Amino acid sequence: MKEARKSVAMAKLNNCPTSPRKMRLVADMVRGMEVSKALYVLKHSGKEASIRLEKLLLSALSNWQSKNEGASMDEANLIVQTINVDGGRMLKRVQPAPQGRAHRVRKRSNHVTLVVGEAHVAPEVTEVNEAK
């Protein structure tokens, strides 16, 4: 069990001031990708949420590296296993409306949990025995 936990690292981002819907668009792009590809996609994405997710992914990678001293990330074949985007707290503000009324504005935030782990590669079959 301890060895299984060693191959997985996680990072959390709480109360990120982006709406969960916008963050999920970016999270869906990198879910299940190799780490190097995911970093490339996040770096070159035009979305503002991708900047925060890139920092979170780098944090998860450093957490993995601190767990696995001396291991290389390139040899480990790391992938983004899961990304969960949940709603965070809402700041409620008031915006003036016509004829003395007011509308409620909900400024949304989110919580992101990112898990990075080793890809489980199926063993290659080198020899097939056929029974007759």
Image (cartoon, rainbow, N blue to C red):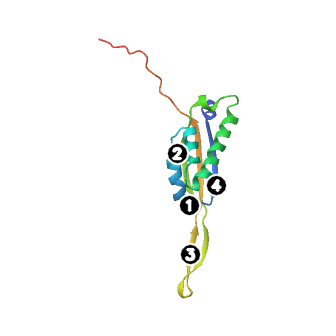
Q: Earlier in the sequence, mark 2 or mark 4?
A: 4
> Mark 2 or 4, which is nearer the eye?
2
Other-residue count near label 2 (Cα within 10 Å), few / some / many at <14 / 14–19 / ≥20: many
Q: Earlier in the sequence, mark 1 or mark 4?
A: 4
> Cα distance, mark 2 to mark 4?
19 Å
Other-residue count near label 4 (Cα within 10 Å), few / some / many at <14 / 14–19 / ≥20: some
Q: Earlier in the sequence, mark 3 or mark 2?
A: 2
> Cα distance, mark 4 to mark 3?
24 Å
Q: Earlier in the sequence, mark 3 or mark 1?
A: 1
Q: Earlier in the sequence, mark 4 or mark 3?
A: 4
Other-residue count near label 1 (Cα within 10 Å), few / some / many at <14 / 14–19 / ≥20: many
Give the left or right position of residue 62, taking residue 96 as reference: right
Up-down relation of residue 13 to residue 72 (above or below):
below
Toward the viewer: 28 or 44?
A: 44
> Cα distance, mark 2 to mark 1?
18 Å
> Mark 1 or 4, which is nearer the eye?
1
Q: Amino acid at mark 3?
A: Arg
Q: Which element type, helix, strand or loop, lies under badge 3?
A: strand
Question: What x and y, as percent, mark residue 25?
Answer: 50, 53
Up-down relation of residue 75 to residue 44 (above or below):
above
Identity of the residue furthest to the top in this view: 132
Q: Amino acid at mark 4?
A: Asn
Pointer 4 with pointer 3, Cβ within 8 A: no
Q: Which residue is mark 4?
A: 14
Q: Which residue is mark 1?
A: 19
Residue drawn where x is 57% and y is 38% of the image:
36
